Structure formats: C-alpha cells, structure tokens
Amino acid sequence: MKPFTLTNNEQTDADVKLQKEISESGKIPGHIAIIMDGNGRWAQTKGNVRIFGHKAGVESVRDITESCAQLGVKHLTLYAFSTENWNRPAIEVNGLMKILVNSLKNEAERLNRNNIKFVTIGQIERLPEKCQKQISEVTELTKNNDSLQLCLALSYSGRWDITEAVKKLSKRVQAGELNPEEINDQLIGAHLSTAEVPDPDLIIRTSGEFRISNFLLWQLAYSELYITETFWPDFRRDELYEAIKSYQERDRRYGGVKNGYSKSVSSSVFNKIIS
Ligand code: IPE
Ligand code: IPE
Ligand code: MG
C-alpha cells in the first residue's frame, strides 16, 4: 500500500490537530455522499452569472476530497450532474462539461500523488467525447490507488440506477440463470452501479434544500442526513468536520431500539401490559 502523502499545502498544524481530535472523538464515516448544491445561488448573491459558481465549486471538491482522505474516509461520492440537469439551458450544460474536463486535467496528478482512486457512476456515454476521454484517463491513472475512493455521479439518478438493475436481473431470469424467488435486497444492491461500495453512512446536502433530488435512492435507506444552509462553493473542511461531529452523536438504530433501552420484564408483567 502506498503511504498517504499530504500534498495539500494549505493544511495547517491546527488542522492536523483538529483531524486527530475528530478521529479520536468517535467513528469516522466509511462512506460520505454529498449533494453539492447552491452553486448558482452563490454566484447570484455575488452579482455573478451561475457558471461562476460552478467554477468556484471545484475548489470545494478539492478541499473536501483531500480532507476526507486525510481523515481516513474510504469512500466519497459526489453528486455532480443529475439526469434531470440535462434539462438546463445548453449554455450552462456546456459550461459544466468544460469545467469538468479542465478540472479532471488539472487535478489528475494531485489525486494520484494523494493515492486517491477516481471512479464514476451514471450514464457516462451521454457525456461529450472529451469528458469521456478525460474520465477514462484519470480512472486508468488512479486505478491502483487505495486511500480514498472518490466517485463522481455524472448524468446519474437513483431511478436510472434502479431501472438498470431491474433490466440486468430480468435478463438473468430470462436466460434461466436466476429464479425470481431468489431476488432479495442484497442481489438488487449487487446489480446497482455502486455494487462494490458500502451504503453511505452520512449524506450531506448543501444550500438548505430538504430533498434527495433523485440521488442514491436505494443506497440511502439508513444513511444519516446532514443539511446545511451553506452554498457548495463555501462548504469547506471546517463544515465537513461539523457534519462528522454531528454524525458521531447519532444513534443509528436501523429500526431496532436504542442500546440499553429495552429493559427486561417478567413475562407476567409483560402479559399484563399488553392485555
Ligand atoms: C449544484 O448547483 C450544481 C449542479 C446541479 C450541477 P446548482 O447549479 O443547482 O445551483 P442552485 O441550486 O441553482 O443555486
Ligand atoms: C441536485 O441539485 C443535483 C446535483 C447537485 C448534481 P439540483 O439543483 O439539480 O436539485 P433540485 O432541482 O434543487 O432538486
Ligand atoms: Mg440546485
């Protein structure tokens, strides 16, 4: 395993200390997923055009990716472009695709030096050729890295993901390889684009919207939610730490009861209560 080397020149001693405190104060989420929202409004509050916000958002992607790697988070999934985002004006879509190509070009070496593995989920074949080419290059360059896995969700939607899984399973049934009775939630999960990745522990949405917007619909079943008013270009590591601290205080019950909460009672008392 390649050691994780810090190439983030901005990381201060105070930040290293803070990260140590967070790691010692509770569990670090293994998988964080983020709905990076509010770029357009961020730009508008500054009297600028929306695309300015998308460009500024790249800085947040770098800061959050590197701080996650430094903290030992294993998976970071970023919602960068949804299936529905294709319905935006062409000028914005084209601008976003150009920013994507340039960012991948600029960040490739740095990702690699930081031992970060880059992957994508979504309908990559719908993206312009140049984006596809750049994605393949960075994916190939970083494929053996093993600190953080950074996954960009591009032309992605949860419903698309589930639909594709249903198609794959139906084909296996049709081919006689699979009995419909054998289909269970593990098998469905194994046919999603995130098959190799554990479900997110923590999902963050920036810009104060209380919705999932067709992100990882299946995978988010028991993820802890953290919603902040901060627009994505202003979301940096200090707020990521707040989100992780909030996560560390949660009691994840998965439909069960709080630890130590179920007092045992004798069966006669129990029967009295329920009669
Ligand atoms: C998120 O910011 C980025 C993408 C969806 C591509 P928005 O572009 O949605 O910005 P707001 O939410 O309109 O402010
Ligand atoms: C969700 O943001 C998609 C991404 C962040 C890529 P949107 O801005 O598209 O979501 P809505 O329209 O507010 O639900
Ligand atoms: Mg938005």
Image (cartoon, rainbow, N blue to C red):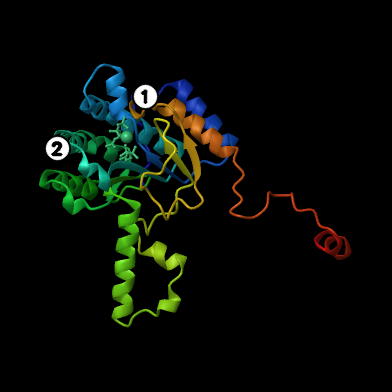
Q: Which residue is mark 2?
A: 90
Visible in this render: residue 170? Answer: yes
Give the quarter of the image for residue 164: bottom left
User: Is any atom of residue 193 visible in this view?
Assistant: no
Q: Is residue 178 left or right of residue 16?
A: left
**Separation of marks 2 and 1 at Cα, in angstroms:** 26 Å
> Which badge, 2 or 1, is on the more N-terminal residue?
2
Q: Residue furthest left?
A: 129
Residue that sits furthest to the right in the current view: 268
Residue type at mark 2: give it: Ala
- Location of mark 1 (residue): 234
View quadrant of ligand 2: top left
* Number of residues whose C-alpha sits closer than 10 Å to that of mark 2, classed few (under 14), some (14–19) or many (20 or more): few
Q: Secondary structure at mark 2?
A: helix
Residue sitting at 18 percent across and 49 percent down? 136
The image shows residue 269 at horizontal and vertical percentages of 87, 60
Question: What percent of the width, then of the height, locates residue 274?
Answer: 80, 61
User: Is 207 or 66 nearer to us in this picture?
Assistant: 207
Please state which amino acid type lies under the numbered disc 1: Asp
Relative to 270, does residue 217 appear above or below in the rendering? Answer: above
Residue at the front extreme? Answer: 275
Q: Does any atom of ligand 1 lie closer than 8 Å to the CB of label 1?
A: no
Across and down, in percent, residue 194 comes to 36, 56
Residue 144 picture location, percent across and down: 29, 51
For the C terminus, the quadrant is bottom right
Q: Nearer the viewer, mark 2 or mark 1?
A: 2
- Label placed on residue 225: none
Farthest residue toward the top? Answer: 47
In which quadrant of the rendered view does residue 148 lie?
top left
In-image side of 183 versus 266 (left or right): left
**Side (left or right) of 132 relative to 44:** left
- Say few, some or many: other residues with alpha carbon within 10 Å of mark 1 (under 14 / 14 to 19 / 20 or more): some
